[in-house]
Image: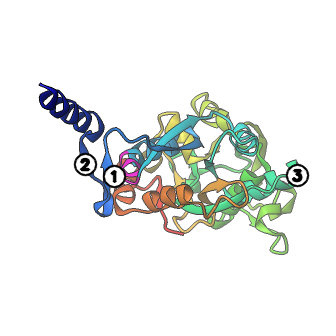
Amino acid sequence: MKKLILTLLSIFALVACGGEESTGEAGDIISENEVLETIIVGASPTPHAEILEAAKPLLAEKGYELDIRVFQDYILPNRTLTDGELNANYFQHTPYLENYNEENGTNIVKAAGIHVEPIGIYSKNYSSLEDLPEGAEVIMSSSPTDQGRMLTLLEAKGLITLDPTIDLGDLRLEHIVDNPKNLEFRADIDPGMLVQAYRNNEGDAVLINTNFALDGGLEPLKDAIALEDADSPFVNIIAVNPGDENSEKIQALIDVLHSEEIHNFIIKTFPGAVNPVSE
């Protein structure tokens, strides 16, 4: 009887401690009972949070649980990161980050570039830039870093000429040196409200960041009368606190976001509106 009891206890111990196992990436054995290390990332809703959702199962294979915190503005993701509540954020490009650091005395750093979202020019009344009339009102973002990018787009499309001595990040309306159509500019709208301005038929043309366009139900390839070129320097990045860019969890996140699976997801889900990069 004593031997039978000991045998039963041994079997119970093996069952209780064994758990089921599965093979993860690169042949790693990951127990289903294993507690995954968490990566907390702040992100804009579209396309950033959607891309991160697609990355979740790939990160789980590497032993990480991805906790996505969605933000509707451009300030809280950086503030929350520096407060230590996030491991990283994913919503901004480098010029915006540099401007934020300068204005707020922070030193957030870029860990990697992930994708480009070409800014679009939208109009309810005109089907092409050539159709814009003399004195047309052009509505732009109130964000200083957006303004330089949007002005560069207008220059690239031949509508204005900018002072070539001004750095890209410093360009403002006063740096327009030639305006053949005498376009009138309005740059007092929060970037998140540009879609609403377009839907309300404000102005003759509205320049809208693609993440807000997608979030507002617009299809940039279909609805925009012009789009920024895909080789834009305004790459959306994974940003972290200094010293974290080479941590194992951040490198795992970057590896997944640069993977073929995620690149294919981006191309299929946001054709032409979001272009993956591997920086």
Q: Is residue 270 above or below residue 18?
A: below
- Residue that carries the numbered disc 2 in the rendered image: 22
Pointer 2 with pointer 1, Cβ within 8 A = no
Measured as percent of width and height from the top left, residue 139 is found at 70, 42
Pointer 3 with pointer 2, Cβ within 8 A = no
Q: CA distance from mark 3 to mark 1?
A: 39 Å
Mark 3: few/some/many CA within 10 Å (<14, 14-19, 20+): few
Q: Secondary structure at mark 2?
A: strand
Q: Nearer the viewer, residue 166 or 97?
A: 97
Q: CA distance from mark 2 to mark 1?
A: 29 Å
Measured as percent of width and height from the top left, residue 43 is found at 58, 42
Measured as percent of width and height from the top left, residue 140 is found at 71, 45
Residue at the image point whose x is 54% and y is 40% from the top: 213
Q: Is residue 39 visible to us here?
A: yes
* Mark toward the viewer: 3 or 2: 2
Mark with earlier residue (3, 2): 2
Q: Is residue 38 left or right of residue 31?
A: right
Q: Is residue 213 magenta?
A: no
Measured as percent of width and height from the top left, residue 106 is found at 83, 52
Residue at the image point whose x is 54% and y is 60% from the top: 248
- Residue that carries the numbered disc 1 in the rendered image: 268
Mark with earlier residue (3, 1): 3
- Residue that carries the numbered disc 3 in the rendered image: 105
Q: Is residue 238 left or right of residue 224?
A: right
* Mark toward the viewer: 2 or 1: 2
Q: Secondary structure at mark 1?
A: helix
Q: Is residue 265 left or right of residue 134?
A: left
